[in-house]
Image (cartoon, rainbow, N blue to C red):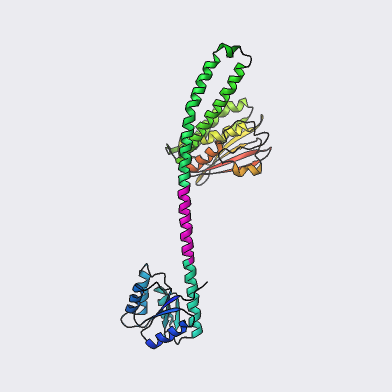
Amino acid sequence: MEISHARVLIVDDNEENLQVLGDILAMRDYNVTLATSGRQAFELIDTSAPFDLILLDIQMPIMSGYDVCEQLKRNPLTREIPVIFISAHNEVEDIVRGFEVGGVDYITKPLQIREVLARVENHLVLARQRQALVEKNALIEALRQRDQETFDMLNAMKDQFIYAATHDLKNPLFIITAYLNLLRDLPQVKDHPDGRRYLDGIQDGVTKMQRLITAILDLAQIQTGANIRMTEVDLYALLEAVTQRFRVLAEQAHIDLLFDSLGQAPYRLLADANRLEQLFDNLISNAIKYTPPNGQVHVVLERLPETLLVEVRDSGFGIPEEALPHLFTAFYRVRTPRHGPINGTGLGLAIVKSLVDLHGGQIEVSSIVDQGTTFRVMLPAL
């Protein structure tokens, strides 16, 4: 690192020592400034460009080198300037005191030219490296701030677009549904051999779009934390109610739906009960959808020391390993011959992940193709 022409201040009340030390440093083309007292040193510091290094004699009248250094370190404008003490004393106490008041090094008299030059060069290099690091960190912070501002702006634009698009779509869909109902009663439609089938296809498309709009709005609301009401919730009772609601659906699909608990009660946490139900509704309904007949879905609640662990295990199709990292990404769908025909918005697991984050938890997934999938939800317990 280039340190030639660095500005060095030497402070010593002995003018002969001052001149000798100045001549030594001039050999390396440093810009040397001399001061015969602490007071003169501060006058020079206040009126000249910043110094890169200060060589400071300890034994000076009125204001010792220790006093000068302490005052330098109290001033935000000078506290980062490295100070090397110079003294005829080499007692351990003197050296330790120098470091305690903020010095970075200690040179004893009589001065050795090579030693002085080596120590000065070393600390100038360190000082320049520190300054470069500070400037680099400042640049990184400025870039991070700019990126954050850009992200916030784009995020706000995204939210505004989603809000406008979804709300603007709701009215046309309502109108389409109204006209569909009118068309169903027209003789031309009733008498047409394919009329009912055509209208059912349109209605199916409208229903899918309504479901997608609702999911988009729901995800946006969850991510902003809007309308969240945290209360103390019994997770055992909540999961028991959720699994009970799905038993008829599971029976119709010829799937065994089980619920078990491990560990000792209570299974309580701070949560929004409605959102927590939504979280496990999504996981259990997915498990049933992607499990073939005669399979099993097993919900297990376990109490750990500081965590409530819920596992939703299924014996379904399984998920390819390459798809696992993308499962919680909005609109991502697993593209396999088995997964493709099953209806979905691609937002269910994104909503699940957002709800887990909202409750300060974590979610993991593991899967083996043709054997099944397990989702693990870990939530902080009370």
- The residue lying at 49 percent from left, 64 percent from top is 133
Residue closer to the observer: 99 or 26: 26
- Most common secondary structure along the magenta stretch: helix
Front position in the image: 283 or 310 = 283
Residue at x 50%, y 37% (from the top left corner): 219
The magenta-colored residue range is 132-150
Estimate the x, y position of residue 77 in percent, counting from the top left: 37, 68
Residue 221 in magenta? no
Q: Position of residue 24 (x, y in %)?
A: 46, 84
Q: Visible in this render: residue 266? A: no
Count of numbered tags: 0
Q: Quadrant of residue 225?
A: top left
Q: Is residue 116 left or right of residue 283?
A: left
Picture coordinates of residue 354 (x, y %)? 51, 41
Q: Is residue 17 above or below residue 285?
A: below
**Which residue is drawn at the image coordinates 51% and 83% (left, top)?**
114
Question: Is residue 373 found left or right of 70 in the rendered image?
Answer: right
Is 153 situated above or below 250? below
Q: Nearer the viewer, residue 151 or 315?
A: 151
Residue 369's spot in the image, x, y percent? 68, 39
At a point 65% along the width and 44% down the height, the residue shown is 322
Q: Residue furthest left?
A: 62
* Residue 147 highlighted magenta (yes or no): yes
